[in-house]
Image (cartoon, rainbow, N blue to C red):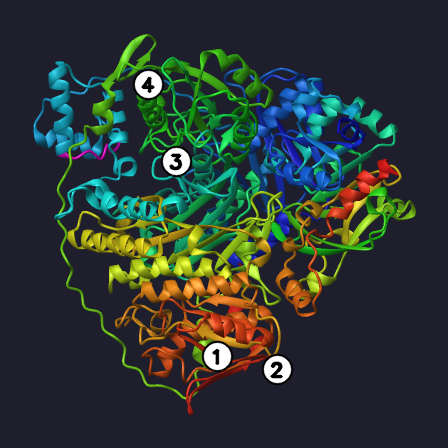
């Protein structure tokens, strides 16, 4: 018997009002009223007294009323009931279970559950098409169900169904015959292991070389692999886990570009820095760590979650952010997350073309706007609910992200170097330690293309391969681990369960002790009926794996129980050199660790320089560039992103210093500064550089521009090259094509060159190599959309005194305005060219690292001495945009003349809009001018004008060309694009 | 050393189930000179920690139970189901309680403070600075006339029925109202960030000893937290003044501690 409790608002419901507006926009104002009811379906036995207690507990008597049974308003025309599909994480349901348990003082039994629903009652004369539009806006069919009722629902009040998961198949382990033709092997590789009914389980993504290596291994053992073994090998050897493209030999680089250019750069920098080396743990853990101060290490890691976000933007983004939080928690013995960063590459939200995943045009891709909104909500929920501030991020738009958006999520962590004598940034599982799984349970979520038969009360909806994050389950164990268990010394090692689930986390930790034995039937499941291979590779969220010494298990287990965290022994670390997995006492996997981790054959790759030609536009120069500048300010990539800053909490943990929007004019800044340790004046600086628009023109220059941008942004806010590390995220497309590989190689080479020059080590990185969409357009024509080669460079800097951080807003009329660095004719790939049309060719900005380094060091010195009143890194949109942003932020005017600016920019448009690297614009109080100029002796700088109290921005470029408009007009344009977001 | 320690005012800051501002709340009390401890609610329920040892209870901000079923509701249920008696005793002994943001939501859901907090008018989470004017009488608010602090909430709109509002005013228990002050003027933002009834940002009960507010004084402990600190600092530099280290939020914590010290 399912008990239904409906909770109805008794006061004006803001949720319903906001929905009303949205529905009216969808239906030409046909909707006149919306009423939202929250429903709880309790699939458990409760006495009538308990039911009324639960109803009472679920209701705030000031704002809500509740009924037992379905609540239907007096008047409505349509009702839409939105719930989750079977097996999808239902956080509200879980919380309600805990409330019910607390009231009844008994735990839910297996099979008992609470399911949550929202019912939207709608008034208005709506066509069926209207209703369908509303339904589509309310749910994502991959994870949610929507039932539509008309007014006749009034008479059918008892109707209630629940999405219970019921798996019927019995568990079995298959042996997979690999002694078959190459053709058949390839089928296994691309479509997956064949089930007994002839269907395939979904891609293993193993190529012929890999499959031959596996066959040879098992030939020597004189047996066939089990499905568990094959699935585990596929996970471990996947591009996602092994980064084969970065690791394999390419052209004459036998060690691969990762070792040569990325790791190689860091090794060279560390050796050169010697005693000044600030790296603590790089490229070996879940995140990279550098010195914060004498007692603490600060860590950073940036992940991508692109494919999941394309299908389920909310779920993809929230699991992205809470997933990278776990990487932080899995650094050393557990760092505390102290900041999140985000990065979005979206298609333009105005793009309404339809795309389909299948030729029959039944699987429609979500439109860009929906993807953007869902991703933003996911980052909002994940970060805010976890109590982690978000001081920095970016949002970028290009048509090439139409097939797959890029969603970057990063987390900064803080960990003491030592606890007593124990070093906390290192870890080692010991033979004999228990393997302990902590956090959520394992279900079918996140298994590659998993389909399974699941039967709910009234439908056979399949459970889903998409995951939803549960930030609170994670927050509970996160606190219990990094704020309690770690400092009680209760475990020897810890890692995150991310891609590949247990198969990856346990096998990875098994390298530390040199072996493991796992009993799969001990793994706690969300619902019965999972196959052993599914348990082993499921990517169900919110789980960590720990190695707990036997003698400490009791204390560990007690602590977790008291914190409401589930912790289960699932096996033991050994020193057998093998990864052994049993299920109900039968061995289902027995592989040499060496083969599991290093058995993947290397593959020689060849790259080829593409011969692409990009035309440069031929332009005439108007006399007045005001309109161009105003239009640039409203471009998606430049306009105010304040709405993001407002919904991503950046004040939690109490350490905010330089916020995402700055100044009286609330202008989006480039870098963030915060205080991760309230008792210290030290600060952490975060920034990012991403310049994909240069990539196809010149990947080497693109990569140097990304690095220079990230570093310049950090320097401009007060960071120093002496304590600044960087992270790389390569998101590429079609990485099996030689031309794409050439671009990759060139970009990586650039990374090496510039990072070693600046002395800014890479400390962590991640790549995602196949960001292509292959599908169909509205006419059913095949379509491939590949992203621009995209390199995100993120910085992690430490500053001594947050009080010396520099903001972008001009401070005082009469202050001098300076431009540091040279401006060249470098408009190729610029925002200006992109605004004008499709021709974007021309010179891409060249980074002169040696000159820039001198300039940055001098700037840091001036900042240290307090000589800089405001500063901004000159980037996208060039000088005109940078100066306008400073002025808008300070809400004060500028009077500048750029006709003698340094560098070889001759045309007025390149002076204004060229994106030449290595430039900083800044203001200096009159009394500091002399000291300031003294510091910059020998470096290119120009005093270009003053801050004024006229409220007008006036930029003269030559006798005949100029820009002039009011600060108010600029702000209007700057804020127009995302006004309604 | 030991004697001075034992003289310190003892503060219990609740944690668990997704509360997340316990560290900055503790730091505020520590700066104010208290001996503040973060305690998981389950340790109080299990009897490992006794409320009676403390003079101040703080329910900090956060997202207890992810706001599922309504902000503060599930945590409040846990308190009501297990800690009603010791909490009543605590109040009877004229000790102090503060609830910040999610803590305020919890205190209203428990019934210790009147009214309720519901979805922002925009139905969206909002992070910004707000300015407040002090209206009510409370040990927590002694000597404070106005205050600026950040908010970070999705359910911060204060609502109460007419009788409750009347009663609040009669008893001088409207603690704080949103006004267009220093930070809202600077950033040109509306005074009321969430549509709160009569601009109410915080309320009081039990002669002002129980205090709940949506804005976060714990995020305003340093001057460098202010949205306009760079220009304030620039101005003090130019006029030769010293730019203070600590922010206005600290006074709330100091007031709580001083109530017992004086």
C-alpha span from label 1 to label 3? 46 Å
Write the residue at 69% across / 48% down. Answer: B221
Distance from Cα at disc 3 to Cα at disc 2: 52 Å
From the image, state whether disc 1 or disc 4 is nearer to you: 1
The residue that mark 3 highlights is A286
Front residue of this view, candidates A364 and A711: A711
Disc 1 crowd rating (10 Å Cα; few below 14, some 14-19, many 20+) is many
Tell me if I can see residue A235 in this picture: yes
Dot 3 alpha-carbon crowd within 10 angstroms: few under 14, some 14 to 19, many 20 or more: many
* Element at label 1: strand
- Residue at which label 2 appears: A950
State yes or no: residue A206 in magenta.
Answer: yes
Q: Give the alpha-carbon distance from disc 1 to disc 4, as whole Å.
A: 70 Å
Direction left: furthest residue: A181
Mark 1 vs mark 2: give the one in front.
1
Position of residue A722 in the picture relative to residue A225 (left or right): right
Chain to which mark 2 belongs? A
Disc assigned to residue A943:
1
Mark 1 or mark 2: whose residue is earlier in sequence:
1
The answer to whether mark 1 and mark 3 are in CB contact below 8 A is no
> A870 and A827: which one is in front?
A870
> Tag 2's secondary structure?
loop
Q: Chain of mark 3?
A: A
Indicate the position of residue A903 as horizontal and vertical percent values: 34, 77
> Which stretch did the figure color magenta?
A202-208
Looking at the image, the residue that sits furthest to the bottom is A959
Of pointers 2 and 4, the one earlier in the residue sequence: 4
Do the residues indicated by labels 1 and 4 lie within the same chain of the protein? Answer: yes
- Residue placed farthest to the right in the image? B170
Q: Nearer the viewer, residue A350 or A971?
A: A971
Comes first in the chain, label 1 or label 4: 4
């Amino acid at each position: 018997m399912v008990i239904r409790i409906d909770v109805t608002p008794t006061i004006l419901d803001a949720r319903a009002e906001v929905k009303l507006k949205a529905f009216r926009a969808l239906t030409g104002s046909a909707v006149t009223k919306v009423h939202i009811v929250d429903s709880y379906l309790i699939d458990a036995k409760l006495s009538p007294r308990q039911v009324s207690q639960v109803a009472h507990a679920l209701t705030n008597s000031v704002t809500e009323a509740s009924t037992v049974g379905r609540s239907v308003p007096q008047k409505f025309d349509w009702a839409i009931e939105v719930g989750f599909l079977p097996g999808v994480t239902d956080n509200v349901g879980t919380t309600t279970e805990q409330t019910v348990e607390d009231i009844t003082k008994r735990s839910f039994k297996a099979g008992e559950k609470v399911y949550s629903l929202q019912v939207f009652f709608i008034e208005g004369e709506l066509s069926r098409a209207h209703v369908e539009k509303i339904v589509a806006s309310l749910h994502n069919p991959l994870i949610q169900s929507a039932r539509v009722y008309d007014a006749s629902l009034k008479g059918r009040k008892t109707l209630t169904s629940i999405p219970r998961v019921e798996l019927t198949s019995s568990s079995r382990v298959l042996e997979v015959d690999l002694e078959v033709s190459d053709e058949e092997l390839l089928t296994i590789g691309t479509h997956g292991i064949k089930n007994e009914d002839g269907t395939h389980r979904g891609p293993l993504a193993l190529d012929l070389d890999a499959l031959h290596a596996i066959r040879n291994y098992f030939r020597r053992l004189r047996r066939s692999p089990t499905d568990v073994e094959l699935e585990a090998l596929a996970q471990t050897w996947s591009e996602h886990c092994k980064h084969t493209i970065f690791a394999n030999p390419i052209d004459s680089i036998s060690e691969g570009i990762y070792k040569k250019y990325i790791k190689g750069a860091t090794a060279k920098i560390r050796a050169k820095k010697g005693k000044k080396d600030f790296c603590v743990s790089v490229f070996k853990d879940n995140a990279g760590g550098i010195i914060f101060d004498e007692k603490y290490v600060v860590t950073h890691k940036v992940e991508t979650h692109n494919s999941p976000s394309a299908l389920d933007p909310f779920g993809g983004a929230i699991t992205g952010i809470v997933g990278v939080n776990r990487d932080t928690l899995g650094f050393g013995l557990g760092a505390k997350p102290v900041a999140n960063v985000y990065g979005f590459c979206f298609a333009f939200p105005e793009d309404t073309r339809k795309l389909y995943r299948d030729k029959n045009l039944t699987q429609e891709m979500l439109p860009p706007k929906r993807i953007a909104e869902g991703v933003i909500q996911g980052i909002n929920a994940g970060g805010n609910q976890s109590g982690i501030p978000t001081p920095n991020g970016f949002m970028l738009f290009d048509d090439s992200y139409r097939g797959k958006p890029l969603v970057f999520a990063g987390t900064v962590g803080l960990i003491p170097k030592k606890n007593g004598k124990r070093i906390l940034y290192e870890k080692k599982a010991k033979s004999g330690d228990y393997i302990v799984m902590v956090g959520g349970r394992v279900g079918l979520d996140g298994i590659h293309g998993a389909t399974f038969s699941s039967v709910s009360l009234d439908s056979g909806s399949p459970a889903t391969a998409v995951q939803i994050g549960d930030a609170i389950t994670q927050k509970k164990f996160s606190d219990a681990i990094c704020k309690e268990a770690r400092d009680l010394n209760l475990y020897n090692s810890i890692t995150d369960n991310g891609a590949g689930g247990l198969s990856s986390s346990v096998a990875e930790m098994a390298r530390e002790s040199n072996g493991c034995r796992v009993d799969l039937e001990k793994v706690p499941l969300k619902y019965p009926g999972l196959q052993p291979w599914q348990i082993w590779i499921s990517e169900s969220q919110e789980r960590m794996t720990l190695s707990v010494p036997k003698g400490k298990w009791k204390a560990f287990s007690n602590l977790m129980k008291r914190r409401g965290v589930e912790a289960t022994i699932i096996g033991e670390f050994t020193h057998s050199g093998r990864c052994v997995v049993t299920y109900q006492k039968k061995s289902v996997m027995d592989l040499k660790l060496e083969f599991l981790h290093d058995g993947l054959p290397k593959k020689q790759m060849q790259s080829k320089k593409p011969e692409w030609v990009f035309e440069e536009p031929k332009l005439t120069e108007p006399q007045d560039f005001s309109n161009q500048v105003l239009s640039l300010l409203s471009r998606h990539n430049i306009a105010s992103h304040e709405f993001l800053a407002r919904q991503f909490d950046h004040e939690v943990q109490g350490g905010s210093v330089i916020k995402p929007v700055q100044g009286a004019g609330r202008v989006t800044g480039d870098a963030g500064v915060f205080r991760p340790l309230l008792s210290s004046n030290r600060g952490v600086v975060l920034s990012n550089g991403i310049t994909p628009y240069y990539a196809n023109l010149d990947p080497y220059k693109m990569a140097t521009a990304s690095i220079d941008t990230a570093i310049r942004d950090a320097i401009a806010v007060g960071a120093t090259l002496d304590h600044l590390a960087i992270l790389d995220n390569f998101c590429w497309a079609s990485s099996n094509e030689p031309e794409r590989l050439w671009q990759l190689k060139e970009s990586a080479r650039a990374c090496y060159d510039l990072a070693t020059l600046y002395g800014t080590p890479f400390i962590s990185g991640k790549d995602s190599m196949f960001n292509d969409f292959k599908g169909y357009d509205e006419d059913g024509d095949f379509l491939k959309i590949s992203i621009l080669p995209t390199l995100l460079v993120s910085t992690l800097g430490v500053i001594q005194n947050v009080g010396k951080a520099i903001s972008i807003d001009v401070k005082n009329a009469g202050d001098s305005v300076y431009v540091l660095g040279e401006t060249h004719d470098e408009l190729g790939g610029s925002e200006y060219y992109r605004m004008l049309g499709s021709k974007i060719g021309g010179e891409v900005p060249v980074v002169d690292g040696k000159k820039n380094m001198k300039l940055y060091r001098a700037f840091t010195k001036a900042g240290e001495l307090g000589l800089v009143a405001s500063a901004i890194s000159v980037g996208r949109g060039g000088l005109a945009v940078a100066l306008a942003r400073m002025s808008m932020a300070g809400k004060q005017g500028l009077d500048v003349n750029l006709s003698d600016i340094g560098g070889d920019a001759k045309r007025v448009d390149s002076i204004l809009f060229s994106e030449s690297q290595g430039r900083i614009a800044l203001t200096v109080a009159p009394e500091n001018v002399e000291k300031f100029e003294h510091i910059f002796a020998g470096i290119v700088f120009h005093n270009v004008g003053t801050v004024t109290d006229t409220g007008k921005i006036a930029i003269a470029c030559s006798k005949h060309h100029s820009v002039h408009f009011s600060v108010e007009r600029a702000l209007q344009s700057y804020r127009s694009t995302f006004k309604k977001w | 050393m030991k004697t001075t320690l034992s003289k310190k005012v003892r503060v219990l800051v609740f944690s668990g189930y997704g509360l997340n501002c316990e560290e900055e709340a503790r730091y505020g009390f520590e700066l104010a000179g208290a001996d503040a401890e973060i305690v998981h609610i389950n340790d109080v329920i299990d009897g490992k920690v006794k409320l009676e040892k403390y003079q101040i209870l703080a329910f900090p901000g956060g997202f207890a139970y992810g706001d599922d079923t309504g902000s503060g509701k599930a945590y409040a249920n846990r308190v009501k189901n297990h800690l009603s008696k010791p909490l009543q005793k605590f109040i009877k002994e004229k000790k102090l309680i503060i609830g910040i943001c999610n803590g305020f939501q919890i205190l209203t859901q428990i019934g210790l403070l009147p009214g309720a907090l519901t979805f922002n008018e925009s139905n969206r989470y909002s992070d910004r600075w707000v300015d407040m004017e002090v209206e009510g009488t409370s040990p927590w608010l002694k000597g404070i006339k106005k205050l600026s602090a950040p908010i970070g909430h999705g359910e911060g709109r204060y609502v109460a029925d007419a009788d409750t509002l009347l009663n609040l005013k009669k008893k001088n228990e409207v603690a704080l109202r949103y006004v267009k002050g220093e930070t809202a003027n600077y950033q040109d933002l509306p005074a009321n960030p969430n549509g709160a009834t009569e601009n109410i940002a915080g309320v009081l009960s039990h002669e002002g000893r129980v205090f709940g507010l949506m804005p976060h004084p714990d995020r305003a402990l340093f001057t460098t937290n202010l949205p306009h600190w760079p220009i304030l600092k620039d101005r003090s530099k130019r006029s030769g003044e010293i730019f203070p280290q600590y922010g206005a939020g600290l006074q709330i914590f100091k007031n709580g501690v001083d109530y017992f010290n004086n």
